[in-house]
Image (spheres, rainbow, N blue to C red):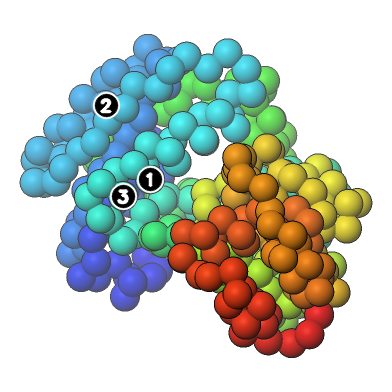
Amino acid sequence: MLEFLDILKGGKNLLGFSGGVDSVGLFFCLQEANIAFDIAIVDYGIRENSKEEVCYAKRLASQYKKKCFSFKAPQINSNFEAKAREIRYEFFEQIIQKFDYKNLILAHQLHDRLEWFLMQLTKGCGLNTLLGFDGVDQRENYQIVRPFFRVCKTAIYEYCYKHKYKFYEDITNNDMAYKRNEFRLKYVNDLMEEYAQGIEKSFNYLNVEKSILYPYQEIFQLGEILYFENFSDITSINQIDKLFKKRGYILSASQRQEILKNNFSCEVAQKYIIDKNQKYIFVTKLHTYSFSLPKKFKDIARKREIPKRIRFEIYAHILSGKIELKDIETYLAKKFSVKI
């Protein structure tokens, strides 16, 4: 039932836990597979059972000799799904960084993949966005691993019922105010009940085609700046999407459209800069600097056709690396070895 066990064996793993059937089923499947892991749970405080679910997580952790990290989220007044996700991943990443976990294990399954697919389909998206997450996703300092990637939710229920494992049903899953719930209750449950096998096959075929349509591209780095060769708009927007995911940020469909509309020269969420020249597309964090660019550097930047949006970022890297002004031309010529 589980996939990617070779990645998890011998690694330091953190399981994102909720007390629901998916995470409880995954907890015990991992136990049976002798995978070492600890757990982390977020209490959003929107259900009466939320405190009880945290207590349950702590009891399981104590019983099976695992660490349990818990966090009481601040009140969320709007855009709950997006903000809850942001809080959850920020919490997970703080634990990962502090305790040096290598893998974050999540219980996403086939129903989740179909929900995402249908939600994106109604917005108008390309193949990469429609398929959403992979079984293994690389982040900057860790991997997200989804062992239930091809498992139907019905099978998880059957597993938990068979072994009489306790789990909690989230009553908010029936609240149609949440878009994901609307898609699940109106479409996904019925489709999966009738066509689960065919849906799984279709996802497998689409993932193969995705790997062909979006081939591997080498990523270069200059300080915090990441850059890659610009082959086509399709491959470039896919690469940007991957780079943002590695940094824990998920691009929305409207942001992708905005990037394309601005020809890969824009700011994203007041956090990141994207810019391009004839050969490369550059992605970096947005910073504010107090220094001015010296004329010599400006001349070199123009000669190398370095985009204006990232010149301060490159010069900040040069200053931090203590590269002499007289050596800048040679240094940048080496980094951008082909004349642009």
The correct choice, above or below, for 148 with respect to 120 in the image is: below
Quarter holding the N terminus is bottom left
Q: Which residue is mark 1?
A: 93
Residue type at mark 2 is Val
Residue at x 77%, y 75% (from the top left corner): 304
Crowd class of label 3 (few under 14; some 14 to 19; many from 20; radius 10 Å): few
> Could you say which is closer to the camera, residue 297 or residue 67?
297
Q: Residue furthest bottom?
A: 338
Q: Are marks 1 and 2 in contact (CB under 8 Å)?
A: no
How many neighbours does mark 2 have within 10 angstroms: few (below 14), some (14-19), or many (20 or more)?
A: many
Quadrant holding the C terminus = bottom right
Q: Are marks 1 and 3 in contact (CB under 8 Å)?
A: yes
The correct choice, above or below, for 72 with respect to 137 in the image is above
Under circle 1, the secondary element is helix
Q: Quadrant of residue 186?
A: top right
Q: Residue furthest right?
A: 261
Residue 146 in percent (x, y) is at 44, 59
Q: Quickly name the residue at label 3.
A: 97
Q: Does residue 53 appear in the picture of this structure?
A: yes
Which residue is disc 2 drawn over?
54
Disc 1 residue type (three-letter):
Glu
